[in-house]
Amino acid sequence: MVAFENVTLRYDERVILENFSLQVKKRERLVIFGPSGSGKTTILRMVAGFVAPERGTVSIADRPVSADGRILVPPEKRGVGMVFQDLALWPHMSVEENVGFGLMVRKVPKMERKRRVEEILELVGLKGFGSKNPSDLSGGEQQRVALARALILEPDVLLMDEPLSSLDRPLAEHLAHEIVRLQKRVGFTLLYVTHLEEEAAIIGTRRLTIRKHTSSSQTSRPEIF
């Protein structure tokens, strides 16, 4: 589903990834595990289309989307959703408006948009929350809003970048189980970045461990557990 082939990327002459290759299967839950600054988020950014590899190829569903410094397929046409670490919810919009924003951009009719927003909010356990403002919600509820906003566009691949890091551990572990439940029900491929062992153990069907500033660990086969 997602493939990296001999990918190299540098920032300011610092090697982030070197000759990095990876295959992620359809409907797999891959946890990308490692310390801050090791290149975990960079992997997600390349899948999303925010950055292209200096060398090598990134493919989604057997179609090259970036290669050798070029973006071949723009982010909005990749079938990829992303949940950021800071959630990036718009404070001036209601929950319904936040979740339905992508549908509005795609000019989905208002009634169809409302129906789909209600369906996805129910799916993530937020039925009846559409009129609320994000600032009125708990951290866990805000996380569910961000997840709903990503899922409403029906992505084939969902990228999650340490989305639970700001929550207390019991709540984070509860939501990690909820993410697994949703992934099994909806069927998207999940790439999930974390530096926490507990989350990695709950989320992943497979794990890629990256150690900071070492190319050998980045090109090694992911650890399976």
Image: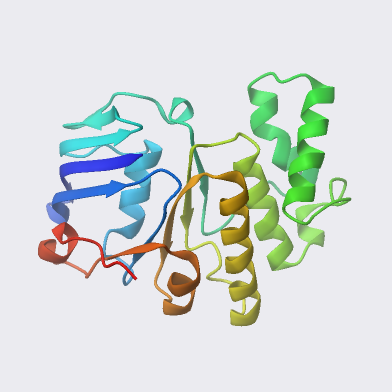
Q: Is residue 10 above or below residue 156?
A: below
Quarter of the rendering containing residue 221: bottom left
Image location of residue 125, percent across then percent down: 77, 57
Q: Residue at x 42, y 78 (%)?
A: 197
Q: Is residue 63 above or below residue 139?
A: above
Q: Residue at x 37, y 38 (%)?
A: 50
Q: Residue at x 76, y 54 (%)?
A: 134
Q: Is residue 88 visible?
A: no
Q: Is residue 88 above or below residue 223?
A: above
Q: Is residue 167 above or below residue 203?
A: below
Q: How many marks?
A: 0
Report the side of 195 relative to 140 (left or right).
left
| Image quarter hosting the C terminus | bottom left
Image location of residue 223, percent across then percent down: 26, 67
User: Please, which colouring scheme is shown?
Assistant: rainbow
Image location of residue 64, percent across then percent down: 27, 28
Q: Residue at x 79, y 24 (%)?
A: 112
Q: Is residue 142 visible?
A: yes
Report the side of 225 relative to 154 (left or right).
left
| Image quarter hosting the N terminus | top left
Of residues 30 and 152, the one nearer the viewer is 30
Quarter of the rendering containing residue 78: top left
Image location of residue 211, percent across then percent down: 22, 70
